[in-house]
Image (spheres, rainbow, N blue to C red):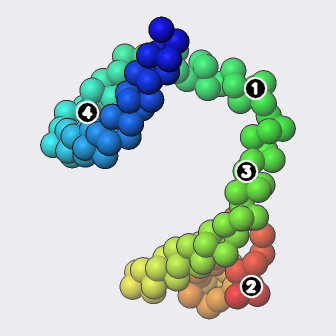
């Protein structure tokens, strides 16, 4: 009897592995076909339960302040180059769009960075000066 159960379990496992890719393809195709419907359902759920969800998130953040701060710091350290490059790109685009607009006299007089009144966005550090 025990031997039969072991054989059955082995054959089920084998069948599962054989059909796994096919089943995953079916699930993926369903999600691709019904992407908007699924997104609408999620949005509706979050709208209905917004207060409860936000209360749970707020409680978690209060309880794990150090953990979250450490995670943010580690994330910044891991992605520092990408983040600073994104900030530089943002500043460059902002500077280009500011050049198109007319700048008032008072803004250009008060600016310490350039004559046209543009100053880079201050974020984590003064790394933009070095780059």
- Left or right: 120 in relation to 94: right
Q: Nearer the viewer, mark 3 or mark 2?
A: 3
> What label does residue 129 carry, if any?
2
Q: CA distance from mark 3 to mark 2?
A: 23 Å
Q: Bin the neighbour count of mark 2 within 10 Å (Cα to Cα): few under 14, some 14-19, many 20 and up.
A: few
Disc 1: CA contacts within 10 A as few (<14), some (14-19) or many (>=20): few
Provide residue 86's location: percent of width, then percent of height: 56, 73
Q: Are marks 4 and 1 in contact (CB under 8 Å)?
A: no
The x, y position of residue 111, in whole percent, is 67, 80
Tell me if 66 is positioned left or right of 14 in this view: right
Question: Image quadrant of residue 31?
Answer: top left
Is residue 82 shown above or below 37? below
Tell me the CA gap for discs 2 and 4.
46 Å
Q: Which residue is mark 4?
A: 38
**Which is in the foreground here, disc 4 or disc 1?**
4
Q: Distance of mark 4 from mark 1, alpha carbons?
A: 31 Å
Name the residue: 29% across, 39% down: 19
Question: How would you rate the neighbour count of disc 3 (Cα within 10 Å): few for under 14, some for 14-19, many for 20 or more?
Answer: few
- Disc 4 secondary structure class: helix
Whichever of callouts 4 and 1 sits on the residue coming sooner in the sequence is 4
SS class, disc 2 = helix
């Amino acid at each position: 009897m025990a031997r039969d159960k072991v054989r059955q379990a082995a054959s089920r496992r084998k069948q599962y592995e054989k059909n796994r890719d096919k089943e995953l393809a079916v699930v993926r195709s369903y999600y691709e076909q019904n992407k908007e419907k699924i997104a609408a359902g999620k949005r509706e759920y979050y709208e209905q339960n917004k207060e409860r969800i936000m209360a749970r998130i707020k409680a978690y953040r209060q309880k794990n302040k150090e953990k979250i701060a450490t995670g943010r710091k580690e994330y910044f350290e891991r992605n520092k180059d990408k983040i600073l490059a994104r900030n530089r790109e943002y500043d460059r685009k902002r500077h280009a769009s500011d050049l198109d607009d007319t700048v008032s006299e008072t803004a250009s007089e008060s600016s310490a960075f350039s004559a046209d009144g543009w100053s880079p966005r201050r974020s984590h550090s003064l790394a933009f000066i070095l780059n």
